[in-house]
Image: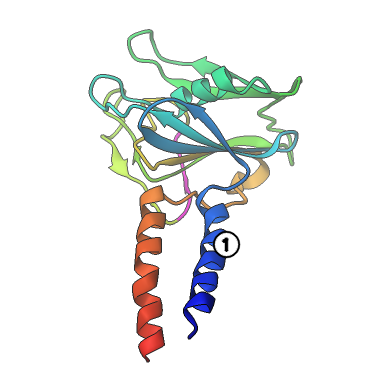
């Protein structure tokens, strides 16, 4: 193959790969070296993806789903949340109550066919010590798993974790797959020259 043609093919390949690594709809919020993702999906808001940066410290300052909502609320002026706390100041136990997007509020609706709140998780940990809740265990990384709420007691996040808050009937999963960890995308890029080299020799 002409080296010039080979270079142009590689250039086209990386142009195609780049949008998949950083989706155009991904909203960057927070600060710190570690990254987790949050997907919001409601009838009014539609679909909204966040990449949340923070500093992971599971001992001194563990973070849960409710904490991620606070980061989103602090940095996205279009979105705000209300949470119900069923715990105490020493041990919060917070759950989603309502979401306001561009001035319109949505919450749980338990009427027939109503849009009810569901929290989905992928990666990271689920469950935490205290309140009789099991210690954190890994949750599936290849798809969504129905979570136990947004409380830090129920959902501990770790780098690469995905959370989703969905207002939909019948426990519908998010309409999109969890965002893969950046490390996985890097490994894919590094492996491709080896795979293509084997194909050229075949």
Q: Bin the neighbour count of mark 1 within 10 Å (Cα to Cα): few under 14, some 14-19, many 20 and up.
A: few
Residue 1 picture location, percent across and down: 48, 86
Give the magenta-colored segment's residue range: 143-148
Q: Residue at x 40, y 36 (%)?
A: 35
| Residue 200 rendering spot, x and y as whole percentages | 40, 86
User: If the image is split into quadrants, where does the C terminus sit?
Assistant: bottom left
Residue 182 to residue 119: above or below: below
Q: Which one is nearer the viewer's eye here, 98 or 53?
A: 53
Outermost top residue: 89
Q: Is residue 132 left or right of residue 122?
A: left
Q: How is the image coloured?
A: rainbow
Q: Main secondary structure of the magenta part?
A: loop
- Compared across the picture, whether 33 is left or right of 75 comes to left
Q: Residue at 39% of width from left, 70% of height from top?
A: 192
What residue is disc 1 on?
Answer: 16
Q: Quadrant of residue 106?
A: top right
Quadrant of the image occupied by residue 12: bottom right
Q: Position of residue 89 (x, y in %)?
A: 38, 7
Residue 152: image x %, image y %?
39, 25
For residue 62, side relative to residue 181 (left or right) = left
Residue 74 vertical placement versus 37 (above, below)? above
């Amino acid at each position: 193959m002409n080296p010039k043609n080979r270079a142009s093919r590689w250039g086209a390949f990386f142009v195609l790969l780049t949008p998949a690594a950083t989706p155009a709809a991904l909203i960057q919020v927070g600060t710190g070296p570690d990254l987790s993702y949050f997907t919001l999906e409601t009838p009014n808001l539609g679909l909204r993806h966040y990449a949340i940066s923070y500093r992971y410290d599971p001992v001194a300052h563990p973070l849960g789903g409710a904490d991620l909502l606070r980061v989103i609320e602090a940095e996205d002026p279009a979105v705000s949340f209300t949470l119900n706390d069923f715990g105490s100041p020493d041990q919060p136990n917070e759950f989603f109550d309502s979401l306001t997007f561009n001035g319109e509020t949505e919450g749980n609706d338990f009427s027939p066919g109503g849009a009810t709140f569901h929290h989905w998780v992928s990666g990271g940990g689920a469950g935490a010590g205290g309140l009789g809740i099991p210690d954190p265990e890994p949750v599936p990384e290849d798809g969504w798993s129905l979570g136990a709420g947004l409380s830090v007691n129920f959902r501990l996040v770790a780098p690469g974790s995905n959370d989703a808050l969905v207002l939909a009937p019948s426990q519908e999963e998010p309409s999109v797959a969890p965002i893969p960890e950046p490390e996985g995308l890097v490994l894919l890029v590094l492996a491709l020259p080896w795979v293509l080299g084997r194909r050229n020799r075949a």
